[in-house]
Amino acid sequence: RYPWFIWPALGWGIGVFSHYMAVFGRRLMRERYFEPAVEREVRREKAVMTTEKQASIDELSATIAHEIRNPIAAAKSLVQQMGEDPVSVENVEYAKVALDELDRVERSISHLLKYAKEEDYNFSLVNIAGVVDAALTQLKAKLDAARVQVTRNYIGGPTVLADAEKMRQVFANILDNAIDALEPLPEGRRIELFVENGGRRASVRVRDNGRGIAADRIDRIFNPFFTTKEKGTGLGMAISKKIVEAHEGVIDVVSEAGVFTEFQVTLPLPPS
Ligand code: ADP
Ligand code: MG
């Protein structure tokens, strides 16, 4: 019924067709489904990043307005009053208060500059446990005054490539906050320290049994100027994050309000 070449011709046809599908079909699939999906994902990611950045800029502006505009307004009105009644006996007091307010502005600005400054890093091979110990020594007076029991769950520690001074500052900031967080506890104030390595990373964990951090705030503690303290600067964690990231490390926190807070700093181990 069929001419003899129908089978080879059909085979050839199927071959050409599947080759065509493999080459163009794959491209079509990629262009039609895969690439738009990736693009959508990237766009979503970007949107999240901008909102986060915007939130932190908003917080920054609000704080600057609060920290700088308010004292300036106060000082201004005091100076105005002094001008209206130059011989008033209260002027001495007014001048003092105005100066205090201006001092506050000066302090805020120097904090701000300190945060914004790009600093130089001096990397060298250091024992991470030694750096943690140096931070403990730095805070010894405050730890003793607050009667905090410190447990060091390590003896030695891995060697990492780091700026020892800057990393000491990170651990000092974390410990400083931990001590503050223990304040509501009348007794049994504890800080536990762990130094571990594994999986090409070194990690330091600092755990306190203090007031903890509410879930709706925990995302903001690394934002510059976020503070819950009367005299806080809100820069300790923001600076620490900047330093850890300059080491290609990660700083994380987990907490349960009223129970505990644990900070974890992870640094890459140097290639051996
Ligand atoms: P500051 O200490 O000046 O407030 P930080 O940047 O050091 O600024 O900390 C930001 C905020 O993070 C603190 O005000 C506090 O609310 C919260 N925080 C940080 N560490 C802890 C901790 N260990 N326990 C509870 N809250 C903490
Ligand atoms: Mg702090």
Image (tube, rainbow, N blue to C red):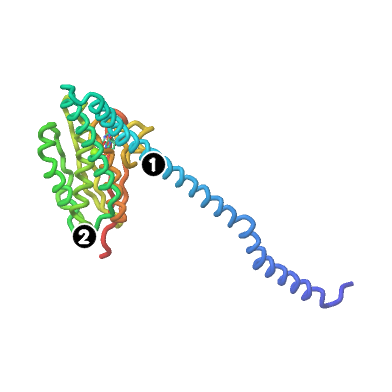
Q: Position of residue 96 (x, y in %)?
A: 17, 30
Question: Could you tell me if residue 185 is visible in this image?
Answer: no
Q: Which residue occupies 62% across, 59% down?
A: 31
Mark count: 2
In the displayed image of the protein, which residue is found farthest to the bottom?
4
Q: Which residue occupies 22% across, 42% down?
A: 173
Viewer-closest of 137 and 69: 69
**Which quarter of the frame holds ligand 2?**
top left
- The residue singled out by tag 1 in the image is 56
What is the quadrant of the C terminus in the image? bottom left
Q: Which residue occupies 77% across, 76% down?
A: 8
Q: Amino acid at mark 1?
A: Ser
Q: Which residue occupies 19% across, 49% down?
A: 168
Report, in whole angstroms, how far the alpha carbon at label 2 lies from the one at label 1.
29 Å
- The residue singled out by tag 2 in the image is 122
Viewer-closest of 67 and 100: 100
Residue at disc 2, secondary structure: loop
- Closer to the chain start, of discs 2 and 1, is 1
What is the quadrant of the N terminus in the image? bottom right
Q: Is residue 48 above or below residue 18?
A: above
Q: Amino acid at mark 2?
A: Asn
State the image quarter where residue 94 is shown: top left
In the displayed image of the protein, which residue is found farthest to the top?
89
In the displayed image of the protein, which residue is found farthest to the right?
1
Viewer-closest of 44 and 192: 44
Residue at disc 1, secondary structure: helix
The 10 Å Cα crowd at callout 2, few under 14, some 14 to 19, many 20 or more, is few
The 10 Å Cα crowd at callout 1, few under 14, some 14 to 19, many 20 or more, is some
Viewer-closest of 189 and 4: 189
